[in-house]
């Protein structure tokens, strides 16, 4: 081995997720939205001029930050935009979890939390979910260097109610608490989504005014159908956002490209479409829950755009393979406690019908 | 101060570069290209469909990686694309400078090298350029944890010849050597640029086959007029690129959005435009050099799309302010050794004429 290789940071090699090139595949493996983004988005992208490409983008993404602030009904100074919620979350770990004490998060959750902790040399301790995949709040009452959890959680879809979120905050006034709300827009009934306010009742956004140390992170990848354009954001107290910006600008001023800023702004200009789209997915989800239950599947009651299903008579890994052969792609996690589950994204009604037809034949 | 603030990573607060909203401003402060990108780029962006937005982008940005590989005449496995060269460089620091020994770079150079080193806790030692702003190669012959330098250097524009680059590599076989070639496409004569090969004679790309530990980093922000779209890339041995990908995928799979991938591919499909554009800028640069010399300005002989100028009779900071009042924005660095210089981007011929007219009145 040449000498220079001794200086290389070694990580567990990782192969990026399968980008299937199979025709007519039903892709229910990455929690993408089955519906296109608002037509305003493509229009806005098509209206971009050459100058927008030639010049450096606005490092503060001011126009997008304003659109997010308006949607969330908070001041602009309480919003931090980034390249997908992954970028926002990683930057938040770097900024807020610098105490040297262990940060806490659930054992079953988004798989990047421990990765970013290790990357930034933040000690961490995973707290086991209970047998219903619920967070046991008391696990988060001990001394720690920060708390992060996803709500609804992934890959389970389980929603923590606002009172319970508040309880964790009450016991963690001296550390930053991050609530990762990638899926929160699906945490309502279809009727609420179609007509309701922009902030779901269980969103921690409702607590922002009460806790200076609370950071809520969201994404446009799921409910706004913009996974391909990479936009996420954090909402928190002015102080938290200032700290985030200080760190972000000191590392890399220009991370969001002009196309993302343009697309993001346009997405927020079409709230009617957003409501129609999310309420459609929620309606499909609730119907599919009933049909899967009738087939004997078990799953936590999901408040997200996916279901986390298991069946007493089926082996999840085998089912994953036979679904794949039938050109239906879902997600299988080969990890302790969840290795007999499949995560199934809510697609269109037609896609879900195809899935249910296939599952029915498997069970017969 | 609330307890949680003790856990926050504190950095020197940084205000992002001025985004001037003045009308008719001549913007020569950020080394943007004065010409629009190839028309193919806007066409390609306008042809994007909703599915490209809805779905996660290809994490490997395969299509773009292929276009870069073809342009650089290297295998696809030797190319690593990223969100601007800042992203590529930061990822390279993280991956290759993990020895615990000091990395070496010039005292006057791109201002983010020490920032990334500090971020990733990499020790570093700046090596003073000589009085002509040239790298003294012998400073880089001592034991170290890695070497990085920009060629042409910024903000000086000074080009290091290939033999001299090779000498540094010969003395650094056991560490990774990064050559930051953000401005290399301007390192030729206008005639060479108009007709010549894609790889300038002094590019370290010519040495890739000889040194497994050499990484060349480039950007589409300057010579391809795509600052707004954030694309950079690294070229190196298959082994280096594999290490980079391992680290990158372990942190964040989806960093380049679909618009960037699309725009970048299109940019590489129009080499005729690229040559016309870069040779035009080089022609303007050489003419401006003569005119500034005639006015008594001194500057290192720039091989980039900017000039680093000083004048024995003028105070650079004052000149910066009066230029700004005249709606001509250039760059001033308040730093030791260079605080009487201005960095002036090469704009269109008309913009440079306006600059020279103004300088002439100041000197009279």
Image (cartoon, coloured by chain):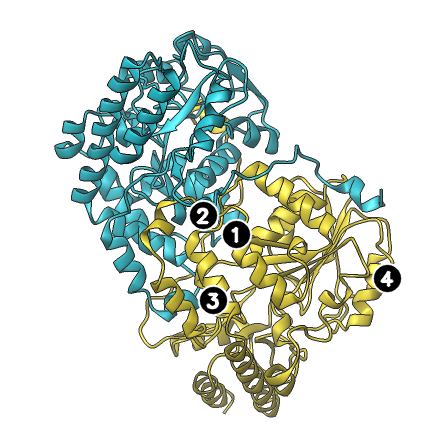
Chain colours: A cyan, B yellow
Gap in angstroms between the C-alphas marked 2 and 1: 7 Å
Q: CA distance from mark 1 to mark 3?
A: 13 Å
SS type, badge 4? helix
* A43 with respect to A99 (left or right): left
Name the N-terminal-most of marks 2 and 4.
Answer: 2
Residue at 73 percent across and 73 percent down: it is B202
Q: CA distance from mark 4 to mark 3?
A: 42 Å
Q: Position of residue B39 (x, y in %)?
A: 41, 74
At mark 3, the secondary structure is: helix
Judging from the image, mark 4 belongs to the subunit labelled B
Do the numbered discs 2 and 1 sit on residues whose CB atoms are within 8 Å? Answer: yes
Q: Count neighbours of disc 3 (C-alpha within 10 A) and say few if under 14, some if 14 to 19, many if 20 or more.
A: many
Q: Earlier in the sequence, mark 1 or mark 3?
A: 1
Name the residue that disc number 1 marks: B61
Left/right of residue A293 with respect to residue B70 in the rendered view? left
Q: Which mark is residue B266?
A: 3
Decide: is B328 above or below B243: below
Q: CA distance from mark 1 to mark 4?
A: 39 Å
Label 1's element?
A: loop
Residue A104 appearing in the image = yes
Residue B35 falls left or right of residue A102: left
Q: Quadrant of residue B279?
A: bottom right
In the depicted structure, whether residue A74 falls above or below residue B135: above
Chain of the residue under label 1: B
Task: Give the distance between the C-alpha atoms of the residues marked 3 and 2, in whole angstroms.
Answer: 17 Å
Marked residue nearer the N-terminal end (4 or 3): 4
Residue A328: image quadrant is: top left
Of A294 and B361, nearer the camera is A294
The residue that disc 2 covers is B57
Secondary structure under tag 2 reads loop
Of labels 1 and 4, earlier in sequence is 1
């Amino acid at each position: 081995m040449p000498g220079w290789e001794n200086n290389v940071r070694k990580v567990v090699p990782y192969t990026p997720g399968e980008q299937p090139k199979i025709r007519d595949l039903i892709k229910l493996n990455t929690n993408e939205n089955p519906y296109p983004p608002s037509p305003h988005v493509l229009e806005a992208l098509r209206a971009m001029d050459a100058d927008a490409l030639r010049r450096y983008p606005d490092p503060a993404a001011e126009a997008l930050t304003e659109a997010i602030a308006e949607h969330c009904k908070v001041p602009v100074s309480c919003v931090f935009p980034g390249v997908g919620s992954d970028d926002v979350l990683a930057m938040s770990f770097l900024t807020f979890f610098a105490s040297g004490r262990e940060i806490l998060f659930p054992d079953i959750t988004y798989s990047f939390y421990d990765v970013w902790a290790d990357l930034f040399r933040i000690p961490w301790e995973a707290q086991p979910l209970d047998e219903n995949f619920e967070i046991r709040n008391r696990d988060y009452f001990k001394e720690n260097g920060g708390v992060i959890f996803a709500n609804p959680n992934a890959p389970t879809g389980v929603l923590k109610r606002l009172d319970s979120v508040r309880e964790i905050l009450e016991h963690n006034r001296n550390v930053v608490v991050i609530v990762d709300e990638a899926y929160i827009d699906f945490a309502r009934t279809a009727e609420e989504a179609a007509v309701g306010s922009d902030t779901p009742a269980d969103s921690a956004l409702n607590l922002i005014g009460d806790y200076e140390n609370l950071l809520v992170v969201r994404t446009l990848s799921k409910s706004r159908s913009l996974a391909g354009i990479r936009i996420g954001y954090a909402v928190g107290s002015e102080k938290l956002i200032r700290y985030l910006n200080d760190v972000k600008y000191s590392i890399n001023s220009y991370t969001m490209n002009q196309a993302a800023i343009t697309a993001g702004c346009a997405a927020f200009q079409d709230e009617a479409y957003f409501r129609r789209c999310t309420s459609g997915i929620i309606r499909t989800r609730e119907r599919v829950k009933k049909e899967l239950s009738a087939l004997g599947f078990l799953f936590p009651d999901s408040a997200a755009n996916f279901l986390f299903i298991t069946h007493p008579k089926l082996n999840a890994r085998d089912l994953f393979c036979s679904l794949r052969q039938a050109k239906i792609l879902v997600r299988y996690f080969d990890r302790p406690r969840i290795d007999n589950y499949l995560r199934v994204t809510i697609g269109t009604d037609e896609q879900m019908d195809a899935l249910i037809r296939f599952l029915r034949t498997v069970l017969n």
